[in-house]
Image (cartoon, rainbow, N blue to C red):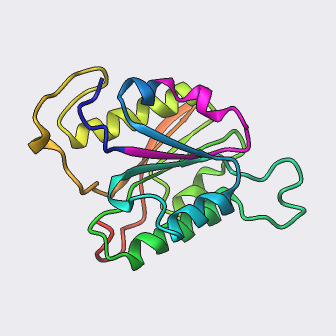
Amino acid sequence: MSVYPQISIIWVDSDPNIYRSTGLFQDQNWNVICFNETADALNALRAKNLKLENIKCVITSMMERDGRRERELMNGLQMLDDMKRIWNQSRSRYRPLMVVNSLTADVNQCKEHDVDIVVAANRNIVQKKVIDRLNAQLNRRYGEKLDDYSKALAVFPRGKVQVWNPQHLSTFSAPSAPAAPFL
């Protein structure tokens, strides 16, 4: 279990039972906030119902199924772009990891949207990758406990996108991040 309960994860997925799949994050004692609509997640951020400084990761599916595209609803990548603007306007010194967990994700398109991790629809793997990435920022590994709050970092370095799917594992350089506040 993590000693960093102030860490919050936003997970946006059309599955109404998505929270049931967040056990690995819950084991870390991290706050998991789930939304079934991209607009609801954005509205919660805009209304300042969530503390930006505590949100360390945003996970989304592509959010294009069940007629969403035909109804011209915002998809997951568009939502991530809007969330990045919210962080930019807040003058925050960091932005959270941006993650796509979807079978229909186009890796190159995700790269263009500055997504950090792309996983082919495997909720356990996406959680392990996020835990490893965040804990690396805290100088820890998955499952390791740490009692020193001073090791927590608020800045997540940019540069590599991790891609996982059942047939292929690769890492490629992400587009260079814009000047502050995104580091």
Q: Position of residue 5 (x, y in %)?
A: 31, 38
Q: Which image quadrant is residue 135 in?
A: top left
Q: Position of residue 109 (x, y in %)?
A: 61, 59
Q: Which image quadrant is residue 37 in?
A: bottom right
Q: On the rendered image, what quadrant is the C terminus found in?
A: bottom left
Which residue of the protein is positioned furthest toward the top in this rendering?
Answer: 143
Q: Which image quadrant is residue 69 in?
A: bottom right
Please state the extent of the stretch shown in magenta in the rendering: 8-23
In this rendered view, identify the residue nearer to me: 60 or 22: 22
Is residue 167 something one can see in this rendering? no
Q: Position of residue 169 (x, y in %)?
A: 50, 33
Confirm whether the magenta stretch covers residue 10: yes
Q: Is residue 148 above or below residue 38?
A: above
Residue positioned 64% across, 66% down in the render: 78
Number of labels in the image equals: 0
Q: Is residue 83 above or below residue 144?
A: below
